[in-house]
Image (cartoon, rainbow, N blue to C red):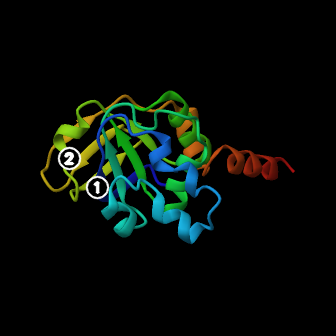
């Protein structure tokens, strides 16, 4: 993963639970059916989200259950990253674990609209709205978290490190 992600924004509000990201009723469905229910609270998202698109959200994104499928489904869908005012702690850690780039950035909801094109620089914790020219900086991710994301998740990173030592 590059530390720079650029894409079109899908915007969500505050307190979006993992049950909306990966609803329980869809978990047993085959992927082609299941993906149609990811973030079903925005019908346009379920129909039109493309690989590389970016989710921008309000506070407490990924609250509720510790459903590991939520970040895994977003990653499999091809979402480039998630930027939010804040994240539920378990969701944030699950994103890192599966290698889905996430960045908390206060004020991000106020400078970005759905459909804007943005660029997220994880190395410098910077969000640039390429549509409006506005920029914000958040707290940087710890280097070990960036390493896990760059390694495509903790399991893939450990596998690659094990191969390097063999």
Who is closer to the viewer here, 166 or 60? 60
Picture coordinates of residue 158 (x, y %)?
Answer: 74, 45
The Cα atoms of the two marked residues, 2 and 1, are separated by 8 Å
Picture coordinates of residue 147 (x, y %)?
Answer: 58, 41
Residue in the picture at 80% in, 53% down: 163
Picture coordinates of residue 38 (x, y %)?
Answer: 46, 56
Residue 1 is left or right of residue 104, and the answer is right
Residue in the picture at 40% in, 62% down: 52
Q: Residue furthest right?
A: 166
Which quadrant of the figure has residue 109?
Answer: top left
Name above or below for residue 42 compared with residue 64.
below
Residues tagged 2 and 1 counted as in contact (Cβ below 8 A): yes
Residue in the picture at 65% in, 59% down: 28
Residue in the picture at 44% in, 42% down: 102
Who is closer to the viewer here, 25 or 5? 25
Who is closer to the viewer here, 45 or 131? 45
The disc placed on residue 98 is none
Which quadrant of the figure has residue 114?
Answer: bottom left
Q: Residue furthest left?
A: 132
Task: Rate crowding at label 2 as few (under 14), some (14 to 19) or many (20 or more) other CA atoms within 10 Å.
Answer: many
* Mark nearer the N terminus (2 vs 1): 1
Task: Rate crowding at label 1 as few (under 14), some (14 to 19) or many (20 or more) other CA atoms within 10 Å.
Answer: many
Instruction: Tell me if residue 136 can be seen.
Output: yes
Residue 41 is left or right of residue 150, and the answer is left
| Element on which disc 1 rests | strand
Name above or below for residue 162 compared with residue 46.
above
Q: Which residue is mark 1?
A: 9
| Element on which disc 2 rests | loop
Residue 47 is left or right of residue 116, and the answer is right
Q: Which residue is mark 2?
A: 112
Instruction: Tell me if residue 147 can be seen.
Output: no
């Amino acid at each position: 993963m590059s530390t720079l992600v650029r894409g079109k924004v899908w915007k969500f509000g505050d307190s979006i639970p993992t049950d909306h990201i990966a609803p329980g009723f869809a978990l047993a469905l085959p992927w082609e059916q299941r993906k149609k229910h990811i973030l079903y609270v925005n019908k346009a998202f379920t129909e039109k989200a493309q690989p590389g698109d970016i989710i921008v959200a309000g506070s407490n994104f990924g609250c509720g259950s510790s459903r590991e499928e939520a970040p895994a489904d977003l990653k499999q869908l091809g979402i480039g990253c998630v930027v939010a005012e804040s994240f539920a702690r378990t969701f944030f850690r699950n994103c890192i674990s599966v290698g889905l780039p996430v960045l908390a950035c206060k004020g991000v909801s106020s400078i970005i609209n759905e459909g804007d094109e943005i660029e997220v620089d994880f190395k410098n914790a910077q969000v640039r709205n390429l549509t409006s020219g506005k920029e914000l900086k958040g707290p940087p991710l710890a280097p070990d978290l960036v390493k896990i994301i760059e390694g495509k998740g903790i399991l893939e990173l450990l596998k690659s490190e094990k191969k390097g030592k063999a």
